[in-house]
């Protein structure tokens, strides 16, 4: 007897799973409408139910596909936005790099101009020093020629200056051209350093 109950229970589960909702709703509809031929009406109603279920399944499938496509479109849109953001960032980085290169080029040109100016100043200072030394040499040689025959009383225009015969004066040590040039270079570098700091 137990195998019969098991068989009935399996059939009951099968019928309830596949026909339960359909038959329940169909019989309720037959009872509500009370058609002349209830069997034909129920048969047509079941066909229509099956058609409606199939259409609903297709609609659900289409909705799922549309939802999937929408998600794909959103992902693609997010990806495009990320690409645009990355492209914008890349452009900004390139612009910053270009500006930095331009600044470095300007700084390099400024340093070259300063070096040229420094060289020009060094050259002018050397020329001025040479001219100064020449003029001092000329002045000393002219004074030496003028003063060579005069006494101290003759050279001095002060009243009461002693009238001494010739006194030979020792030449004072002169700075060499190199030491004067070094002195003025050091003076110039100190001036330039103080100017830029």
Image: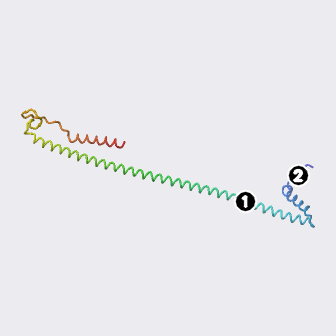
Residue marked by disc 2: 9
**Residue 35: quadrant of the picture:** bottom right
Q: Which of the two labelled residues, at mark 2 and mark 1, occupies the earlier sequence position?
A: 2
User: Tag 2, which secondary structure?
Assistant: helix
View extreme (front): residue: 159
| Residue 45 vs residue 148, the one in the foreground | 148
**Quarter holding the C terminus?**
top left
Mark sitting on residue 26: none
User: Tag 1, which secondary structure?
Assistant: helix
Provide residue 120's location: percent of width, then percent of height. 28, 49
Colour mapping: rainbow
Q: Is 186 located above or below residue 62 in the figure?
A: above
Residue marked by disc 1: 63
- Relative horizontal placement of residue 4, taking residue 177 as reference (left or right): right
Check disc 1: other Cα within 10 Å, few if <14, some if 14-19, many if 20+. Answer: few
Marks 2 and 1 sit apart, C-alpha to C-alpha, by 37 Å
Name the front one of labels 2 and 1.
Answer: 1
| Residue 95 vs residue 83, the one in the foreground | 95
**Residue 44: quadrant of the picture:** bottom right
- Relative horizontal placement of residue 110, taking residue 140 as reference (left or right): right
Check disc 2: other Cα within 10 Å, few if <14, some if 14-19, many if 20+. Answer: few
* Residue in the image at 53% along x and 55% along y: 88
Provide residue 27's location: percent of width, then percent of height. 90, 60
* Residue in the image at 8% along x and 37% along y: 154
Look at the numbered discs 2 and 1 and tell me whether their residues touch, using CB distance below 8 Å.
no
* Residue in the image at 81% along x and 63% along y: 52
* Residue in the image at 45% along x and 52% along y: 99
* Total numbered labels: 2
Provide residue 72's location: percent of width, then percent of height. 65, 57
Provide residue 22's location: percent of width, then percent of height. 85, 59
């Amino acid at each position: 007897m137990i195998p019969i109950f098991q068989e009935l229970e399996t059939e009951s589960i099968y019928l309830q799973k596949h026909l339960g909702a359909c038959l329940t709703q169909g019989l309720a509809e037959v009872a509500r409408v009370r058609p002349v031929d209830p069997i034909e009406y129920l048969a047509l109603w079941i066909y229509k139910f099956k058609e409606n279920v199939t259409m609903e399944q297709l609609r659900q499938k289409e909705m799922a596909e549309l939802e999937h496509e929408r998600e794909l479109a959103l992902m693609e849109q997010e990806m495009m936005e990320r690409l645009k953001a990355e492209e914008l960032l890349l452009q900004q980085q390139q612009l910053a790099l270009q500006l930095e290169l331009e600044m470095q080029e300007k700084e390099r040109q400024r340093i070259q101009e300063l070096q040229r100016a420094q060289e020009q100043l060094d050259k002018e200072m050397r020329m001025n020093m040479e001219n100064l030394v020449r003029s001092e040499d000329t002045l000393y040689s002219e004074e030496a020629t003028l003063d060579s025959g005069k006494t101290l009383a003759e050279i001095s225009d002060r009243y009461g200056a002693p009238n001494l015969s010739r006194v030979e004066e020792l030449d004072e040590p002169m700075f060499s051209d190199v030491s004067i040039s070094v002195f003025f270079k050091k003076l110039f570098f100190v001036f330039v350093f103080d100017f830029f700091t």
